[in-house]
Amino acid sequence: MSESLSINSSKEEIYRAVLQQIEAVIGGTGDLIANLANVTAVLKQAFNKFHWVGFCRTTAANVLTLGPFQGPRPVYAFLLIKACVALRPGCRRLF
């Protein structure tokens, strides 16, 4: 678990431990939303320097919806633009 990781752990050790945690919490669960919520919780806990962790999901044609997240309430429009740039090669860069 991330609670037992030393501050002096290497990135490789941290990533390996995080991957094991993610595999443990999503193993055998077919619920996408529950899995995404659990992954965000593991990542936020393991990397406490992250201000925000979460997902945007495609819920309809050309519609990105903010999915499970951990952290302060995000500015939705900003995330939509960022997600558009990251996920849609044809999107114009707007910032």
Image: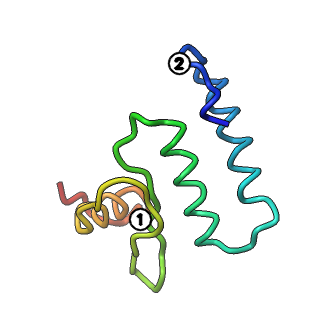
Residue 14 at x, y = what percent? 62, 28
Residue 33 at x, y = what percent? 58, 72
Residue ID for mark 2 = 7
Does residue 94 appear left or right of residue 79 in this picture?
Answer: left
- SS of the residue at dot 1? loop
Give the Cα distance between marks 1 and 2: 37 Å
Q: Which quadrant: the C terminus?
A: bottom left
Residue pushed farthest top? 8
Reply above or below: 49 against 55: above
Figure quadrant of residue 65: bottom left
- The residue positioned 60% from the left and 58% from the top of the image is 38
Figure quadrant of residue 54: bottom left
Reply above or below: 69 against 16: below
Q: Which quadrant: the N terminus?
A: top right
Residue 25 at x, y = what percent? 71, 55
Residue ID for mark 1 = 88
Query: Of the residues shown, which amino acid type is indicated by label 2?
Result: Ile
Query: Of the residues shown, which amino acid type is indicated by label 1?
Result: Arg
Marks counted in the figure total 2
Coloration mode: rainbow
Residue 63 at x, y = what percent? 39, 80
